[in-house]
Image: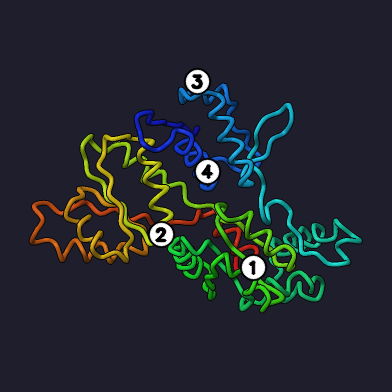
Amino acid sequence: MVQYRIQTDSEIPASKQLFDQIQFAIASRQYPPGHKLPSTRQLAMETGLHRNTISKVYRQLEETGLVESQAGSGIYVKAQGHEGGTQRQSPILKQYPDAYKVVQQSLDELLGQGCSLNEARELFLAEIDWRLRCSARVLVTVESRDMGAGELMVQELEAALGIPVQLVPLEKLAQALELTNSGTVVTSRYFIQHAEAIAAPKSVRVIPVDIHDYAEEIALIKSLPEGNSLGIVSLSDGILQIVEVIIHSLRGDELLVMTAQVSDKYKLNALVRSARTIISDQASYQTTKDAILDARDDLIRAPKLVCSENYIGTKSINLLKRELGLG
């Protein structure tokens, strides 16, 4: 069960703390599609916030497309992208709205029985041709202000899928899709609504991926003694901003938290000299490790370096493999 902690004496508004924590729970699949969010009364009792503040946060979540309100029932996590049943538009699908579902289910059954894509191609050419061609474009898209998160996704997807993956800023996605009539757009749930609005008219499917839940890292942060200095290193500035809010919500001012993008050598060098514990994403791990080694003559005690192995959740990787016919 997700637990919320609000630091009432923080400079970060309480509504911002709660919004980011709920958004993280949705993005990391702790709240899957269809999950009912706690009532405003429940959250008020848990967090000490006024119900009007919680209602405001829920309205903001609804405006971002992450949740939807069902009259008389409550607030539910919204299914998005491919899991919401998004289909490629064509005159045939408009005439036979259930056709896509029938083809998809039948193909999955054939694959489950051991049939190869080549063997199934004669039966379902229109659907499996997209899956069969591993050279079909796979595009990762994120907002240009957080390309670091996109780079993390590309590195993990290329390693897991074994095919080239292209990174495209969300602001340039429309132009990129003009150059192709097939492919898949992959993004995190933070950007799914915008990506879907761009891709759907061009008959390109969008598959949202869940970020890792970081349960081990969160447990480590909770276990650190008061007064400990904690460093966070990542490719992504957006990740660092969210992490700061989450850690502050968990520990308040008990920890001294320092963050650095791996490309910022000045901040990284200052961080390795000050932090006792450092958590790094996989892409930043070696550079952070090298920075610690370079500073060893200035260090009384080298910081403990912890590598976060994943940014994308394992289930999402497996979903993409299945959708692309790779396993």
Query: Looking at the image, is mark 3 or mark 4 earlier in the sequence?
Result: 4
Residue 147 percent location from the top left of the image: 46, 64
Q: Are marks 2 and 1 in contact (CB under 8 Å)?
A: no
* Of 265 and 113, the residue lying toward us: 265
Instruction: Name the residue type under label 1.
Output: Thr
Query: Looking at the image, is mark 4 or mark 1 earlier in the sequence?
Result: 4
Q: Mark 1 falls on what kind of element?
A: strand
Q: Which residue is mark 3?
A: 45
Which quadrant holds residue 86?
Answer: bottom right
Give me the residue at 64% from left, 68% from top: 184
Q: Which residue is mark 4?
A: 23
- Quarter of the image with the C terminus is bottom right
Q: Residues within 10 Å of mark 1 (few under 14, many from 20)?
A: many
Q: Mark 2 falls on what kind of element?
A: loop
Residue 299 percent location from the top left of the image: 10, 55
Q: Residues within 10 Å of mark 4 (few under 14, many from 20)?
A: some
